[in-house]
Amino acid sequence: VTQCITMKTAVLLCAALAVPSGAFLAPRAKVGVSWKSRASRMGVSMSGTAEQTAVAILGASGYTGAELVRLLVPHPHVKIQAMTANSQAGQSMGDVFPQFAFMKDLPTLCKHEELTEEDWKAIDMVFCCLPHATTQEIIKTLPEHVRVVDLSADFRLSDVGVYEEWYGEHKAVELQKEAVYGLTEFAREEVGTARLVANPGCYPTAAQLATVPLLEEGLISPEDIIIDAKSGATGAGRAPKQGTLFCEITEGIHAYGVAAHRHAPEIEQGLRAASGKDDLVVNFTPHLMPMARGILESIYVKVSGSAKESGADAASVLREALEQRYADEAFVHVLPEGSSPQTRHVRGSNHCLISVFNDRVPGRAIIVSVIDNVVKGASGQAIQNMNVMCGYPEETGLTNLPMFP
């Protein structure tokens, strides 16, 4: 009875959102690879399930840290063992984020250096929500048994030279060699056995989910890809900045990081691997929207292969290819012809919605991809990766439907 009521509720909600009723209910098989060297300690059985994983959140006072707490508290296999926030050390999570004020059993925020050797013995997994260039130094000091999902950009770029061009000196080159880029839908096997997973950036997640399958199948050209992206203000972090003050962003929209945004090389890294073209360059321009969360990317592409041969019906070919690729995915959904996704349709969830349209310009198509930048673009995907690393069903703790209105 409960299952029927839940299904009915989901169908009614999806109807209200103008989203296909099955969009968030796609079945998927259980996926995950347990880390054998830690199996006995974490209670992981040979069937790939574990009783509980003790986690630490480093940098818990930011938006991604808070979102991790929101999603991990109801996770049936996770215990939040420690949380650090150097500038708020000694405070409760409820002091920093009042939405957690009634949760008295969360650990008190502390400084990273206050965690003792004994504390680390009780920790299995770390989520790093620290600023760029800080994580490398911290992860180098962690005990070998601790596995890591890093939400910063410190290990996303496999080429150290490219990293240093965009971010500065790389301080953990040896660790970079073992880091796995964790766009879960494309790297489950590697994520499952990794010690260090580099969680993708928000813009690159939406862009790659929409284009990688099409590049791999030769249905779109690696040339002249234009990504017009728009994001909510949480993408800039919680630290006060003039550019994210209410009066600076309300009632307007503006481009930023034009031809210089750090997510461009990360997008190109993924698209080059998918297309086999090492010289692929994207035209990527992000915009700041007067909203808290959400990303919408309008991606303009040249069609090729069978999509080009189909002429005016190119969008149908691209749509079908994406539908086949994501048919068994829990979180990536391709909308039917004529449906256009909106950020409110994924708010608070780990879902990605994709639509494909024929452009008025012959030989071109428009792909629209939306995610919640704080969930699928950050903390939700980090938990998705943790589930795979620990052998839990991938959707565990992430089955909440979008919040609307």
Image (tube, helix red, strand yellow):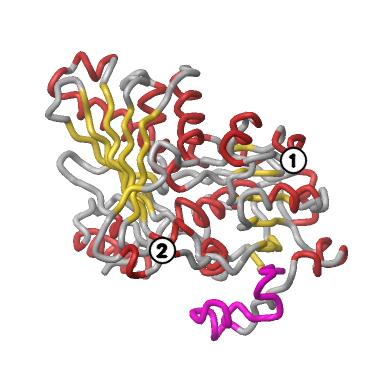
**Residue at the (59%, 50%) spot, across then down:** 152
Q: Amino acid at mark 1?
A: Ala
Q: Position of residue 15 (x, y in %)?
A: 20, 59
Give the mark, 1 or 2, whose residue is nearer the N terminus: 1
Q: Nearer the viewer, residue 2 or 160?
A: 160
295 in magenta: no
- For disc 2, the neighbor class at 10 Å (few under 14, some 14 to 19, many from 20) is some
The residue under label 1 is 172
Q: Is residue 166 left or right of residue 322?
A: right
The spot of residue 88 in percent (x, y) is 65, 75
The image quarter containing residue 289 is bottom left
Residue 287 placement, left or right of 387: left
Secondary element under disc 1, as helix, strand or loop, is loop
Q: Is residue 192 left or right of residue 138?
A: left
Q: Residue at x 50, y 61 (%)?
A: 237
Residue 293 bears which disc, if any? none
- Is-magenta flag for residue 85? yes
**Residue ID at (45%, 38%):** 260
Query: What residue sits right under mark 2 in the picture?
Result: 244
Assign a secondary structure to mark 2.
Answer: helix
Q: Quadrant of the C terminus?
A: bottom left
Q: What is the quadrant of the N terminus in the image?
A: bottom left
In magenta, the rendered stretch is 81-103
